[in-house]
Amino acid sequence: MTWNPFGRKNDEAQSEQTANDTETAASESKGRPTPKRREAQAKNIHPLVPKNRKAEAKAAKKRMREKEDAQYEAMRTGDIANMPRSERLPWRIYIRDYVDARFNIEEFFIPVMFAALIAEMVVMAFSIAASYIIMIALYVYIIVGIIDLFVMWQGLKKKLIEKYGEKAVAKGMRSCSYACNRAIQLRRWRVPKPRSKKRGDWPK
């Protein structure tokens, strides 16, 4: 077999001519001109970077804000279906119902703290001993509240394990902190909103 240095170029020219003849025949059969391969590929090319980055970022930020507002409204109204995924976990729903059904001593922590500070400032002008008594009473309230939270979590933890298994009280779930944070808030201020209007409606 004799090597021909121009054979490859001839083959490529022949292949291109064959492709052009095929496209011409296809266009005649369809009754309209068939776009060349490069033109067809060019139509499918989309830029990876948007033309207006600032406008795109602003639109994305607006969509995120609308989504967050909708989720907060769902938590405020108690619409579980539209809450964030973390708030829809079954054991978190159980935790909220359990805490809301219970009378928690630490629930009044913020009002008691403000009342104690104001009373101390007023009483201190007349009697330092009375201000000490107020501070001692405040510390006693805090200690009793911590004990109450500990008792609450021990009972709640046992029920969570029985109902949902160890995963419900795993470290990554932060179930303990979630329950305690809800317990130290006034019931009417809690978000998500309590599903029951009154205490004593224990979850099953």
Image (cartoon, rainbow, N blue to C red):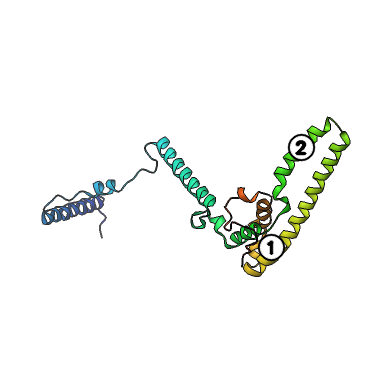
Instruction: In the rendered view, tell whether residue 143 sits above or below residue 1.
Output: above
Q: Residue at x 71, y 48 (%)?
A: 108
The reply, left or right, for residue 50 in relation to residue 184 is left
Instruction: In the rendered view, tell whether residue 115 sits above or below residue 164.
Output: above
Q: Give the image location of residue 146, x and y in percent.
A: 77, 52
Three-letter amino acid code of the residue under disc 2: Leu
Q: Give the image location of residue 27, x and y in percent.
A: 14, 53
Quadrant in the picture for residue 170: bottom right
Question: What residue does disc 2 label?
Answer: 117
Quadrant in the picture for residue 138: top right
Q: Which of disc 1 and disc 2 is earlier in sequence?
A: 2
Q: How many marks?
A: 2
Q: Nearer the viewer, mark 2 or mark 1?
A: 2
Question: What residue does disc 1 label?
Answer: 156
Disc 2/disc 1 C-alpha distance (Å): 33 Å
Residue placed furthest toward the front: 126
Q: Residues within 10 Å of mark 1 (few under 14, many from 20)?
A: many
Q: Residues within 10 Å of mark 2 (few under 14, many from 20)?
A: some
Instruction: Say what secondary structure mark 1 lies in.
Output: helix
Q: Give the image location of residue 181, x and y in percent.
A: 67, 51
Three-letter amino acid code of the residue under disc 1: Leu
The reply, left or right, for residue 107 in relation to residue 1 is right
- Quadrant of the image for the N terminus? bottom left
- Quadrant of the image for the C terminus? bottom right
Front-most of 118 and 56? Answer: 118
The reply, left or right, for residue 89 in relation to residue 126 is left
Q: Residue at x 30, y 48 (%)?
A: 44
Q: Give the image location of residue 200, x and y in percent.
A: 65, 61
Front-most of 133 and 152? Answer: 133
Q: Residue at x 16, y 56 (%)?
A: 22
Instruction: In the rendered view, tell whether residue 128 sits above or below residue 17.
Output: above
